[in-house]
Image (cartoon, rainbow, N blue to C red):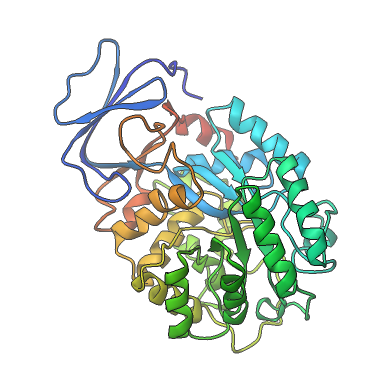
Amino acid sequence: MNERKTGDPVVIRVARIFDGARILDADTVVVRDGLIAEIGRNLAPPHGSEVVEASDATLLPGLVDAHTHTLAVADLEQALAFGVTTELDMFCGPDQLRALRKAAESRADVADIRSAGIGATMPDGHITQLVEMGVYAPFPTLSTPGEAPGFVAARVAEGSDYLKILVEGGRPLGWSQLPSLDDETLKALVDSAHSHDLPAVAHISTQADAQRCLTAGVDGLVHAFVDTAPDRRFVDKAAAAGIFVVPTLTVFEMLYGPGRREGDCVDHPRVRPYLSPGLRATVQAGGRANLPSDLPAWASAEHAHRATRALHEAGVPILAGTDVLYPPSVHGLSLHAELAALVDAGLTPAEALTAATLAPAQAFRLTDRGRITTGMRADLLLVEGDPTRRIAATTEIIGVWRAGHRFDRDRYRTTLDT
């Protein structure tokens, strides 16, 4: 952890500043008391401030991973090492969530976290498989509309920041047919979430289930669909409904091919030192750890790519999220791979950066972050080069700040097995 006090001003001088949407006409950011205090050109450093100068670098908001499965505090530390200052967890038991939140509130060397808590699914429905696999403790489920208000109220009491609803029959993901929530229960869950002012997001893998979720009034989809090419009518309805989509392209590339992108960069000199040798080997080996192998021929990552492109062109906000859970996916690093996948799916590099900064902050009501503007939290990522032109530059990390604290990447590196 950085030993400088939060109140010590920090002045960051760079070639360019990306504010979450565009390049600013400025080259200097002043951080004070954990917040962005000033932005301008050639600003004089306050007395006693630390000055960071990077002549060919870009300063951007700390990244937000809009779909994670965060199991341990070490996941949050690893995320921060790669510039992810906030993780949006999509399933977490209450005891687990309390431990993660306690760490995020008391430590400056881990990413912040928001969470859905326990997701809504049927008895024996999707994600209950992970109880048998030992990932999650047993958790409550529901099967009727009448249970929805009580289910949602319990999540609110546990501190959930949004409601995740699992609408999944299983076959596209290689599972046997699984029971899934019916339309009435789906709608009751969405209505109950909204009555508590919680956003409602849905896991789907088919276009038909995505349409059902639109009809029910969800705020966002936390996957693209993989069963068919996008239908124009669905795309138009999604745009009209004002939903957002977190495509999680890299997890589908792992499932259906061509494979994980993380393996292409683990030997990069600015990546390799921040992965343990064991994790590097796992990522390089690729594979589909703890996932079923009986995948249907009609499901493909290409469908997800095409859906992402069509939705983006229609004006649907696209958010960057990884669905990180097991290696070879990696907290933090996998978001950089997802940014590259989004560019391949039709976003410009600048639009991909927005998908990991401003867009998730807006979609999940994180009003204090996701932008570089005065008064915002100083969650910042400093990288070599210009990621608005070459998205791979996001891995060229020079520095990471969370609420004004500079993350000590050198110390973190020494904690890894070497």
Residue 7 placed where, x, y %? Answer: 40, 15
Indicate whether 302 appears above or below 322. below
Q: Is residue 55 left or right of residue 20?
A: left
Indicate whether 334 appears above or below 56. below
The residue under the point 82% across, 67% down is 144
The residue under the point 78% across, 39% down is 95
Residue 317 placed where, x, y %? Answer: 41, 62
Indicate whether 282 appears above or below 308. above
**In front of the other: 182 or 278:** 182
- Looking at the image, which residue sits at the far top? 47
Indicate whether 53 appears above or below 73. above
> Which quarter of the figure is the C terminus placed in?
top right
The residue under the point 71% across, 57% down is 119
**In front of the other: 361 or 68:** 361
> Residue 80: in sight, yes or no?
yes
Q: Is residue 27 left or right of residue 129?
A: left
Total marks placed: 0
Q: Is residue 275 left or right of residue 134?
A: left
